[in-house]
Image (spheres, grey):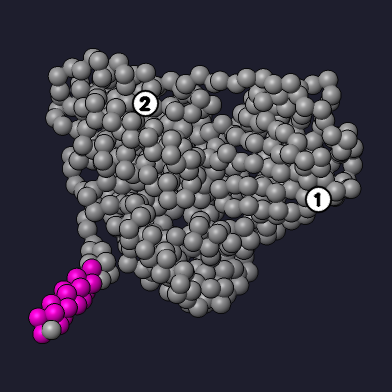
């Protein structure tokens, strides 16, 4: 018996020690670290007009390892519908060595929304504005740029808020506007009459610089500062100082009704053009004989000013801590979310010298100075799967770098090159089912929708028994007004609209319910819209990556 008790006691002690070691390891503060220092190797050419391509082996990368990356993706995607990529681009030494376009509806040279990777580009523009003397420094007080406004909750903490605090996401503002809060504060900002006033009026929950709190409104304020300082629209400034010199011609960026950029996101770039931002940073701001961005700004941008793993507080509306939510997010930050060792000026950092511009749904611009490597991913990922592209980078792309050059591998190279174009579309038309009675009753009727997160309004469906497609139009957000065809015969229709190419198919799931599956080429969701008609009412449910939303509308006019 004594032996048994002794053994049990030993087990208990060992478990307690193990638990203590784990807790110490898990809760240990992430140490500060310096940016990776290196001397930039000038590329053999500048891809201002276009990127040149090379075999992986000529750049010291193993084609077979890159093929293993593709095989891993295909296997994972087959079993996980939340893991869906539109493109993968691998660049070493300034040459594209691998391209993968898995989505048949996303061709090469098409623009893709980059979501919050936009934030990193806004950071670049702030650096350029400071270099040109348009903004004095990162220590400028934010409220000084808006001295003509009557700002609420204006205390000493808000008066001390600087551009640096906005850049490092340490504002102290009680914004509740990120994925951590289901974008509650961000939707409230977009429903307000004056976005800038809403942002400036936010109460303070902490001293500036006290804690990291990822905030879309922080970057919106950076865009407003840029607009105020440059006295022009920010896209014009970006074209003249950044995009133009890099040879980036195709850019789409949304604005609000007051002419301010939606700086936290909603920029569209071609994957190859997003990679140019990575090369600019790899080259420490130098581009083809010009210093577009000061090297010192690059260094500052990639300095860890904040440490996301160390401070995760989810606050209730009354500013008290939501301990349960904080605990869940702490686990996600520590063990699942990549590039959280440090946060620079709108750049995510790991402790090994790699850095990342990250957008929701799996938009990545990842740079490894040590390997002279750029990795770009676009996709339609959701849940934890939006972090899976990082596995491709760490488990395959970095290990593929083996030397300065490798012996040629034409067989593997040919296989790899076969992924550079998207697969062919495969559709098979079916007879259009008879339309229900309600289709004729609601055809051409405009429905005015009640307030909703996306500002969806003026919805109209038109049916014609002589056609194998319907027509859907609506207004949404600040500038969306698409009008597109919806295939009724099993073949999705492709329609060019002001929001890009819309691909849509539809079906009547019940006599009063019409369901539309929608993909916007280069956007990050496969959306489903369910229209249910009840007299003069339309009950619309949108199923999308940010949640499911149901709201109603009334017939306004035909």
Judge from the rendering whether residue 125 lies leftward or rightward of residue 5; answer left or right: right
The residue carrying mark 2 is 99
Query: Which residue occupies the extreme front position in the image?
Result: 1
Judge from the rendering whether residue 14 lies leftward or rightward of residue 101; answer left or right: left
Instruction: Name the dominant secondary structure of the magenta segment.
Output: helix
The answer to whether any part of residue 374 appears in the image is: yes
Judge from the rendering whether residue 419 lies leftward or rightward of residue 549; answer left or right: left
Residue 553 image label: 1
Q: 174 above or below 280?
A: below
Q: Position of residue 119 (x, y in %)?
A: 45, 48
Question: Tag 1's secondary structure?
Answer: strand
Q: 395 above or below 207?
A: above
Numbered range of the magenta stretch: 2-22
Query: Which residue occupies the extreme left position in the image?
Result: 3
Quadrant occupied by the C terminus? top right
Q: Position of residue 295 (x, y in %)?
A: 28, 44
Quadrant occupied by the N terminus? bottom left
Q: Mark 1 and mark 2: span between their CA atoms?
A: 45 Å
Whether the magenta-drawn stretch holds residue 375 is answered as: no
Mark 2 surroundings within 10 Å by alpha-carbon count, few (fewer than 14), some (14 through 19), many (20 or more): many
- Between 397 and 365, the one nearer to me in the picture: 397
Task: Residue at 73%, 39% (x, y): give it.
Answer: 509
Q: 152 above or below 66?
A: below
The answer to whether any part of residue 283 appears in the image is: no
Task: Residue at 24%, 25% (x, y): give it.
Answer: 63
Question: Tag 2's secondary structure?
Answer: strand
Do callouts 1 and 2 mark residues in contact (Cβ within 8 Å)?
A: no
Task: Residue at 31%, 18% (x, y): give it.
Answer: 415
Mark 1 surroundings within 10 Å by alpha-carbon count, few (fewer than 14), some (14 through 19), many (20 or more): many
Task: Residue at 57%, 39% (x, y): give it.
Answer: 526
Q: Position of residue 277 (x, y in %)?
A: 37, 37
């Amino acid at each position: 018996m004594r032996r048994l008790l002794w053994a049990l006691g030993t087990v208990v002690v060992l478990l307690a020690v193990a638990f203590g070691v784990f807790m110490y390891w898990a809760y240990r503060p992430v140490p500060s670290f310096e940016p990776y220092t290196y001397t930039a190797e000038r590329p053999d050419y500048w891809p201002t007009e276009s990127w040149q391509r090379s075999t992986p082996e000529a750049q010291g990368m193993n084609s077979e390892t890159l093929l293993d990356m593709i095989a891993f993706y295909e296997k994972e995607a087959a079993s996980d519908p939340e893991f869906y990529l539109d493109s993968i681009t691998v660049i070493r030494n300034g040459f594209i060595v691998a391209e993968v376009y898995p989505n048949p509806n996303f061709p090469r040279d098409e623009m893709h929304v980059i979501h919050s990777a936009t934030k990193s580009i806004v950071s670049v523009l702030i650096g350029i504005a400071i270099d040109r003397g348009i903004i004095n420094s990162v220590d400028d007080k934010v409220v000084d740029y808006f001295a003509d406004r009557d700002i609420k909750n204006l205390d000493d903490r808000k008066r001390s808020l600087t551009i640096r605090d906005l850049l490092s996401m340490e504002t102290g503002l009680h914004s509740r506007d990120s994925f951590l809060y289901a974008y509650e504060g961000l939707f409230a900002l977009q429903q307000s009459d004056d976005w800038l006033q809403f942002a400036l009026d936010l109460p303070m929950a902490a001293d500036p610089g006290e804690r990291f709190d990822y905030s879309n409104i922080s970057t919106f304020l950076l865009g407003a500062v840029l607009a105020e300082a440059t006295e022009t629209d920010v896209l014009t400034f970006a074209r003249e100082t950044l995009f133009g010199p890099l040879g980036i011609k195709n850019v789409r960026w949304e604005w609000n009704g007051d002419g301010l950029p939606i700086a936290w996101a909603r920029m569209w770039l071609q994957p190859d053009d997003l990679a140019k931002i990575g090369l600019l940073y790899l080259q420490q701001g130098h581009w083809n004989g010009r210093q577009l961005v000061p090297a010192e700004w690059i260094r500052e941008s990639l300095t860890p000013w904040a440490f996301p793993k160390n401070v995760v507080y989810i606050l209730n509306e009354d500013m008290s801590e939501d301990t349960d939510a904080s605990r869940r997010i702490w686990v996600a930050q520590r063990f699942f979310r990549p590039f959280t060792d440090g946060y620079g000026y709108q750049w995510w950092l790991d402790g090994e010298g790699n850095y990342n511009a990250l957008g929701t749904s799996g938009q990545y611009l990842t740079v490894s100075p040590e390997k002279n490597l750029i990795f770009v991913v676009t996709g339609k990922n959701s849940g934890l799967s939006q972090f899976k592209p990082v596995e491709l980078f760490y488990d395959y792309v970095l290990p593929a770098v083996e030397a300065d050059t490798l012996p040629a591998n034409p067989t593997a190279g040919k296989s790899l090159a076969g992924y550079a174009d998207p697969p062919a579309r495969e559709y098979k038309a079916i007879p259009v089912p008879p339309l229900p009675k309600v289709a004729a009753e609601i055809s051409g009727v405009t429905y005015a929708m009640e307030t909703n997160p996306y500002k969806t309004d003026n919805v109209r469906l038109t049916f014609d028994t002589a056609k194998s497609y319907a027509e859907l139009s609506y207004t949404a957000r600040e500038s969306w007004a698409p009008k597109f065809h919806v295939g009724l015969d099993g073949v999705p229709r492709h329609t060019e609209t002001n929001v890009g190419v819309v691909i849509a198919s539809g079906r009547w799931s019940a006599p009063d319910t019409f369901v539309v599956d929608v993909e916007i080429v280069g956007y990050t969701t496969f959306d489903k819209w369910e229209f249910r008609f009840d007299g003069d009412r339309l009950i619309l449910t949108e199923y999308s990556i940010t949640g499911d939303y149901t709201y109603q509308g009334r017939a306004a006019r035909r």
